[in-house]
Image: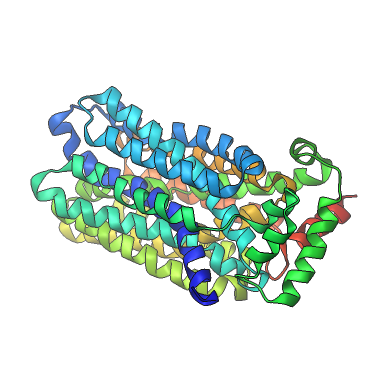
Amino acid sequence: MNRSISKGWIFFFGALGGLLYGYDTGVISGALLFISDDIPLTDFLEGLVVSSLLVGAIVGAGLSGYVSDRFGRRKVVFTIALIYIAGSFVLAFAPNVPFLVTGRVILGLAVGGSTAIVPVYLSEMAPTDSRGALGSLNQLMITIGIVLAYLVNYAFAPVEGWRWMLGLAAVPAVVLAVGVMFMPESPKWLLKQNREKEARKVMGLTRDEQEIEKEMEQMKKIEAEKEGTWDVLKAKWVRPMLLVGSGIAIFQQLIGINAVIYYAPTIFTEAGLADSASILGTVGIGVLNVLMTLVAIATIDKLGRKKLLLIGNAGMVTSLAVLAAILFTAELTTAVAWLTVVFLGLFIIFFSATWGPVVWVMLPELFPTKARGAATGFTTLLLSAANLVVSLFFPILLGAIGTAWVFVLFAVIGILAFLFVYTYVPETKGRSLEEIENDLRGTTS
């Protein structure tokens, strides 16, 4: 296999965990329309089924980062694939609510693991000048997984085949389990294990010789510091980036993206569209998600991370505000329903081109090598916790205050996110992971 093909497959399988995350995030939106016909669900139980995935994700994110720092990224990804398969089968044959919740928790363990490990692996495998684009492949795979889920939902909607919708997640999980057997281990983790020869060989798949020597020198200098994972995590110089990483992770969810992904068919149905039209509307949103992530891949290493976050905030807040104004003032007609689709589409456009990929790229960039897995795991744990809050309370808020006020709330959160990014978030474009770490150590000390 030549070098270019090897590089392509490395990043394809490296990001494939994101596709499973996206599929299991998006598929529940269509399945919810039909589960109640077989297993009765109240508003609370509906929120519990959706949000139980995030309970597992919190545990998975918290554990996988530390475990990957100890045993390697590759072994953890393989385990994650097996957990995805197990969760998919439990959901496909679930006879009642406890089994639905159990299956979603199992899937959540894998989702949390993939959100913590996939960005770290991609970031450590990628050369500096294309780290943003290659790191964005995680978000691209997430969006493709969401579209795939929507298409599966649409295909099985006529027969109300919610079990097929949920169970088919096992197929890409099997592909991931096979593919990961041929993936190399992260070179930065290998060097941590004193396996320099293997690290150089892996780096040769994605970098030229000059870049390998430069990075190797920087990595050895950092490895010479006699620190363990916990020593690094509690160090004073790491705290600012833990706060920044935690902030952007939480804001990415609190602005409401997964409320749209999980409940888009429900929103469209309440706005006046039929069930099949609602699912079809979500397919369109999913396709926009993919296309705009491709735009992000093309621009993130040119415009920079911080600028994209600020642009995204401005666009999302505007879309939500206009959408809320329409819903406050207009009668619920088919035209208003499709306007809802349009402005939710604009919200998705701005999110997918900015906050969606940029946060996944920045989280591992912010943290030092010796604790990158654990620190990224901690921040993605907070991301999953914020996702849990949104997904659990969104249907309750929707019933209590209505769609328009919920969008107003998300818009206010978007304004707060803009102020946070403008004030605290640094730019990481164009610097190697080791340069970012050295700057952080030097600036604080």
Please state the horizontal and vertical placement of residue 76, each as a whole percent of the image. 53, 43
Tell me: residue 413, above or below residue 97.
Answer: below
Measuring from the top left, give residue 357's x and y in whole percent: 51, 60
* Residue in the picture at 61% in, 62% down: 125
Q: Is residue 165 above or below residue 89?
A: below
Tell me which residue sits at (41%, 56%) in the image.
142
Residue 212 in percent (x, y) is at: 73, 70
Q: In the displayed structure, does residue 393 sit left or right of residue 332?
A: right
Q: Is residue 83 visible?
A: yes
Q: Name the residue nearer the viewer: 74 or 345.
A: 74
Please identify the residue farthest to the right as the structure is shown.
445
Q: Which residue is drawn at 38% across and 45% down?
A: 259
Name the residue at the left extreme.
159
- Seen from the viewer's position, the closer of residues 273 and 149 is 149
- Of 104 and 216, nearer the camera is 216
Residue 51: x %, y % from top left:
39, 34
Quarter residue 397 falls in: top left
Q: Nearer the viewer, residue 172 or 193?
A: 193
One can see residue 274 in this view: no
